[in-house]
Amino acid sequence: MTFAVTVGGRSVECDEDQALLDACLRAGVWMPNSCNQGTCGTCKLHVVAGEVDHGSSPVETLSDEERCAGMALACQARPRGDVELRPQGTSAARTANPLRDMVATVREVSDIARDTRRILLGLNEPLTFDAGQYVELVVPGSGERRQYSLANTADEDKVLELHVKLVPGGVATHGWLFDGLAEGDEVDISGPLGDFHLPPESEDDGGPMVLIGGGTGLAPLVGIVRTALRRHPEREVVLYHGVRGEEELYDGERLTELAGQYPNFRFVPVLSHEPVDGYREGFPTDAFVEDVSTARGWTGWLCGPPAMVEAGVKSFKRRRMAPRNIHREKFTPADG
Amino acid sequence: MTTTERPDLSWLDEVTMADLERNPYATYERLRAEAPLAYVPVLGSYVASTEEVCREIATSPDFEAVITPAGGRTFGHPAVIGVNGDVHADLRTMIEPALQPAEVDRWIEDLVRPIARRYLEQFEADGQAELVAQFCEPVSVRSLGDLLGLQDVESDKLREWFAKLSRSFTNAAMTEDGEFANPEGFVEGDEAKAEIRSIVDPLIDKWIARPDDSAISHWLHDGMPPGQTRDREYIYPTIYVYLLGAMQEPGHGMASTLVGLFSRPEQLEEVVDDPTLVPRAIAEGVRWTSPIWSATARISTKPVTVAGVDLPEGTAVMMSYGSANHDTGRYEAPTTYDLHRPPLPHLAFGAGNHACAGIYFANHTMRIALEELFEAIPNLERDTREGVEFWGWGFRGPTSLHVTWEV
């Protein structure tokens, strides 16, 4: 008889007389372990769902209290049915904003830069989300789904703002959002999704931040940066917007205005391929390295094409930002 | 070939201690292939070299622990690693409370993280460092030293002690007559022990009169009738076990893990970017270069046949865990560091009732130290102007590790 053992989103098969650890390791699912004889306690974990037989787990390593609290030694415990495990030290998932399916109404479609549109979607009911999260749009007639980040702050919860870049030949953009989408249209959406957002306000210490957006990767940063500044008006924040040429820049006025309100906020547009006097030239990830001599204690936020995100991680680490403080949202155009 | 035919092992006569200390792998690779349980003349002992034979002996009811001759000469009796029965049970009962996972969890973060931070602050602005001497060893000895109650002993002194005890413990070469081939090799260990006694004896006097929460104070008092303490001569050999292995090996483990990761830059980057991978990186690091490479032994309690070799009662066998962890029967390309290799259990912490008591403490000390290192210096690179040399047969790790980073 075999049962399903689920840990960290992976599911493996485990015989009724096989140790949980053995089943996981054989399936290539690593978990901390050392002695494999029940004495060191390294493989202690939480049984989140289902029941296990503790086998010969010694009470010195796994106390009765721990057994009652749902702990087990993976190297000794056998499954009595399907079980779900959570390794020690990993916290239970934070209560997430509930995911909802909704019908939104197009409020506004505007061309804001070369091949770039701002789309405003009205909701009947407010949506609970964190600035930086995204929603999925169902492409009519195709069943395909596409993900777009919200540029909103959490209190802008009845009209969602999306920034969309045209993908030539793309089912969603070329075939719909840039062709035929009109005010008043109904759109099926799901959201909110994603973990690209600030920590809860109580855990936000107001430390310095750098945000780098490539093209319409600016969208979630517009929501995050406004939220961050409202929480801590004095905090140091630098926002880079990297595009190929001046014609792809947008929201400059909005962000310059923000810089007027918050003295320690800087907005830096950077042009990579079509230089123009008065603008920084090159890649935004290099501009950061030129501008900031040390990013120790900073948090970093990257949203854009994978190559830009990878370059950003390298730049941040070069300036010694702690990797756990680097947040990244890669957008990989599914469209095309 | 019949089963009674023995391979010709005369090549073993040429093996010297210096060969083994410089690089034991070639010799043990041949042993694993030709004779997984073999008598090695320079060591004056049988040696178990494969995963299967090491595990069989370590967990066999027909064997019990014995300390190696050089180890016994260095530590004296009764050291926890070399005793059995009631004495072993008492010594494990003495040391284990402080090392239980639930107990370690209570203080390990507050103990190790500030120590790691403190050593990092001394060099993180320099753009270069030698991590073995400036980070791995100091964090290892300071963490354990503070736990034991040796706060007033400088980290450099603790490093000097483990180095001297280590060379003495592994001064294993024997003559054909069963005598130590290099008796002068024990002198520095004796000097270290004399100095240890001169510093620890007054502390023991203090703890007898005024117990505190340090580990050695607990060793003296725990489980004893009121007004009585364990005799210091009874606990000193186990204090030496700590001052050698427990002080030295977390440092070895960290440094070997780092060298392994530097050999796979893409895997180093993965671990730096995702600190939850640090424990797995360490597990592979101590498999790849096991800190306790060949330092423990077992002795048969009756005539027994292992791996086709008949052993009379009272035959000592050295457990070569560093070799077992390179067993090609178990690991593909074992000489390569690979964070993502199939995660099979290894023998770096031994097996059976003498498995390392400090597994949990050591793993978490190494984890916190590397987390802090990667957090402070995420742009760490190996300084390729300097080589990396490993040394040791009984205990093994890099002798130095030069790194650079942009500041």
Image (tube, coloured by chain):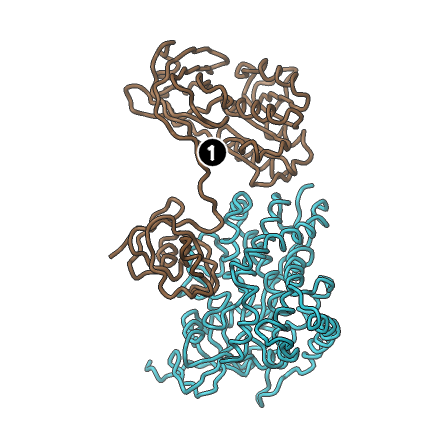
Chain colours: A brown, B cyan
Return the x and y of residue A285 as percentages of the image width and height: 59, 30
Q: Is residue A261 left or right of residue B9?
A: right
Residue farthest along the left direction in this orientation: A1
Marked residue chain, label 1: A
On screen, A297 above or below B130? above
Residue A155 vs residue B323, the one in the foreground: A155
**Residue B372 seen in the current view:** yes
**Residue B236 seen in the current view:** no
Q: Quadrant of residue A36?
A: bottom left
Q: Quadrant of residue A127?
A: top left
On screen, A257 above or below B304? above
Return the x and y of residue B67 as percentages of the image width and height: 55, 79
On screen, A65 above or below A156? below
- Quadrant position of the N terminus of chain B in the picture: bottom left
Three-letter amino acid code of the residue under disc 1? Asp
Return the x and y of residue B401 as percentages of the image width and height: 64, 56
Secondary structure at numbered mark 1 = loop
Mark 1 = which residue?
A195
Q: Quadrant of residue B230?
A: bottom right
